[in-house]
Image: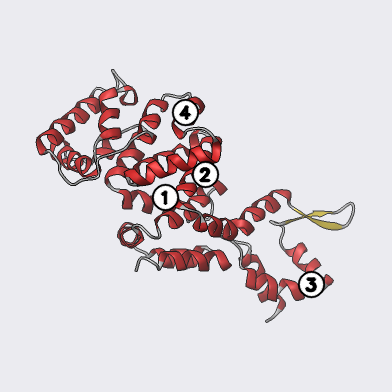
């Protein structure tokens, strides 16, 4: 392989989600000092030329970004190896530490897990942090979102299939009225709406979702202006759509490291649950298969591990 081709291969090895360890080993490892110097001079996005002292030094920002890329594979393996209860407890704790930009992870855990899975995560949280997740959500979140989030993480929903259709119709009207009156009373402060979303079973809420569309002609989340309520409705009523959208955003090259981490989180947590349905929904929404998108975007061992996980569901 000519040096220019090797140079391009190394540049590509550092570009994307994860790194291409094989290229780094087989190409970068054999370069002599002059070839490495030529590489540094030709990759100004990674290296800064110090003309006064006549050497090229790493761009510190790039070094920080590459550290995240090198550990993606390790983080995915560690997360996959955890008991699901511990995994969700640690993800919830991390979301609380990061603040409002990550509160959607709390909603995801509270609304896409079964009642027993969420209860297990709450038990694991006790074991790991000597607090309850409910008290930490209540004490760490001081914004208007607190009431909804505490209610969601505290839930233990009925898991059966029985639905009272008249009640579902009535609650669809309640939601419709709350949305229409949002300017007078913000929906985030509406106790009745929070009660419905935090306590009703998922089959019941899917019936509410259907009746709401019959009433308004639009899907419920389309009429919601509040991000937390949108995420809540999607996670409860159309989880495969929610996960597909999270994956699509995470697979973009220009997003920050926290959004990129969503790729690992979603694939690891859904691989044994509903990955087949997520892959089908992703293909319907974006016209490309999820494995193909990962093949194009991710690198090295990280890419191979993700592809192995998403193949589990068929």
Left or right, 157 with reference to 308 = left
In the rendered image, is residue 9 in sight?
no
Name the mark on residue 246. 1
Q: First in sequence: mark 3 or mark 2? A: 3
Work out whether mark 4 precedes mark 2 in sequence or the reverse, and give the earlier one.
2
Mark positioned earlier in the residue sequence (1 or 3)? 3
Give the percent coordinates (x, y) of residue 90.
52, 44
Q: Write down the residue under mark 4.
A: 135
Q: Quadrant of the C terminus?
A: bottom left
Element type at mark 3: helix
Disc on the earlier residue, 3 or 4: 3
From mark 1 to mark 3, how far is it between C-alphas? 41 Å
Taking the spot 86% from the left edge, 54% from the top edge, the residue there is 51
Which is more foreground, mark 1 or mark 4? 4
Q: Which mark is residue 276?
A: none
Q: Disc 1 versus disc 4: distance between alpha carbons? A: 27 Å
Q: From mark 2 to mark 1, how far is it between C-alphas?
A: 19 Å
Query: Is residue 161 depicted above or below 196 in this figure?
Result: below
């Amino acid at each position: 392989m000519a040096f220019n081709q090797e140079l391009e291969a190394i540049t590509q090895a550092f570009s994307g989600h994860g790194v291409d360890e094989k290229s780094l080993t087989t190409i970068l490892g054999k370069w002599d000092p002059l070839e490495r110097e030529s590489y540094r001079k030709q990759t100004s996005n990674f290296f800064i030329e110090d003309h006064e002292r006549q050497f090229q030094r790493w761009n510190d920002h790039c070094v920080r970004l590459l550290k995240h890329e090198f550990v993606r594979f390790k983080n995915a393996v560690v997360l996959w190896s955890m008991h699901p209860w511990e995994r969700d407890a640690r993800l919830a704790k991390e979301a609380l530490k990061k603040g409002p930009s990550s509160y959607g992870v709390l909603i995801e855990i509270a609304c896409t897990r079964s009642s027993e899975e969420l209860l297990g995560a709450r038990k694991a949280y006790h074991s790991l942090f000597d607090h309850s997740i409910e008290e930490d959500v209540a004490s760490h979140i001081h914004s208007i979102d607190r009431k909804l989030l505490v209610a969601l993480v505290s839930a233990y929903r009925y898991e059966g299939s029985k639905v009272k259709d008249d009640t579902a119709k009535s609650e669809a009207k309640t939601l419709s009225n709350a949305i229409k009156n949002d300017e007078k009373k913000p929906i985030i402060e509406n106790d009745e709406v929070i009660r419905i979303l935090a306590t009703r079973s998922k089959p019941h809420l899917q019936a509410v979702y259907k009746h709401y569309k019959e009433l308004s002609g639009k899907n419920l989340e389309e009429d919601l202006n509040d991000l937390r309520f949108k995420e809540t409705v999607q996670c409860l009523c159309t989880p495969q759509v929610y996960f597909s959208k999270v994956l699509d955003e995470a697979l973009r090259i220009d997003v920050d490291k926290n959004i990129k981490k969503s790729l690992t989180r979603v694939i690891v947590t859904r691989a044994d649950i509903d990955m087949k349905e997520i892959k089908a929904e992703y293909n319907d929404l974006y016209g490309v298969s999820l494995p193909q998108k990962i093949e194009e975007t991710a690198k090295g061992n990280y890419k191979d591990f993700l592809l192995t996980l998403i193949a589990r569901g068929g």
